[in-house]
Amino acid sequence: MTSSRETNRNRTRDAVCAALALLAAAAPVLAESPFHIELEGGPAWQTRNDFAVPGDVGTRLSLGDAPAVAAFRGTLVWDFGERWSFRVLAAPFSTETEFVADSPVRFEAAVFAAGVPLTQRFEFNSYRFSFFYRFRSSGPWSFRAGATGKVRDASIALAGDGKSERRDDLGFVPLLYGGARYDAGGRWAFDAELDALGAPQGRAIDLSLRTELRASDRVRPYLGVRWLDGGADNDEVLTFATVYYAFAGVRLNL
């Protein structure tokens, strides 16, 4: 039987996919399409992985570095009006880390024995909707600023010692959005983009830097790096993670 949490997660994914499909379907009917998509992927390294479930009485663990994994994301941007843009982004992410605890581990309703192999699975799927304003450029520089609504579809699972427990966390997080671009002349450009916000209960930061080549009017390949950092600390769950990405992608003007 499908749980209500799993049903909500499926509905979230379906809503994001429907929004992407609707915007993509609308693009070809416009004389001068204001749409572009960005597809990217590459290795990601999780360098911080702190968690405790429940957050108040669960065993706090710091697993440190995890093996590199492949990470992908897709973005659709609609430039409308004279200066406004709407962005839809989907960024799934998951890792697995194996470890042996020196002492018993309390996680959710279970206590895992010390000295036995355990596997932690960390999922952090991010779906975002952004509105931002594109300021008039000053020379080679241009800037943009706005707000992002982030749907956080996360989970932490622990298995081993004949047991398996999982904590799901589906929620909405408001973020501030900002970006800057430098056109170096010719066909090269450099771009920085940020979604971020902090509060006493936690924080979320997604910062990327990339170099872009205008291969043609429609195709722009790019290379970049990304720093993802964030987490929450409350009675139900404590989790903080840091992930570094190296990625290659392509922007396609529709």
Image: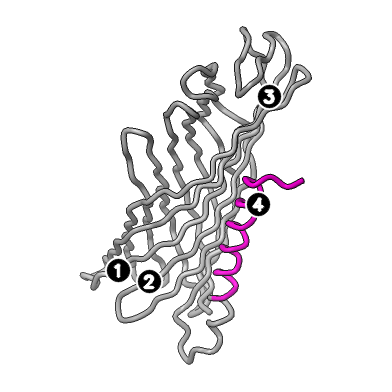
Kind of residue indicated by mark 2: Ser
Q: Quadrant of residue 100?
A: top right
Residue hosting label 4: 7
Residue hosting label 1: 133
Crowding at label 2, few (<14), some or many (≥20) Cα neighbours within 10 Å?
Answer: many
Vertical side of 228 occupied by 103: above or below: above
Identify the mark at residue 98; answer none if there is no mark: 3
Q: Mark 3 vs mark 4: give the one in front.
A: 4
Magenta part mainly helix, strand or loop? helix
Q: Are marks 4 and 2 in contact (CB under 8 Å)?
A: no
Q: Which residues are magenta?
A: 1-22
Crowding at label 1, few (<14), some or many (≥20) Cα neighbours within 10 Å?
Answer: some
Tell me the colour scheme of the image: one colour
Q: CA distance from mark 4 to mark 1?
A: 35 Å
Kind of residue indicated by mark 3: Glu
Kind of residue indicated by mark 1: Tyr
Identify the mark at residue 85; answer none if there is no mark: 2
Crowding at label 4, few (<14), some or many (≥20) Cα neighbours within 10 Å?
Answer: few
Q: Are marks 3 and 4 in contact (CB under 8 Å)?
A: no
Camera-side residue of 21 and 236:
236
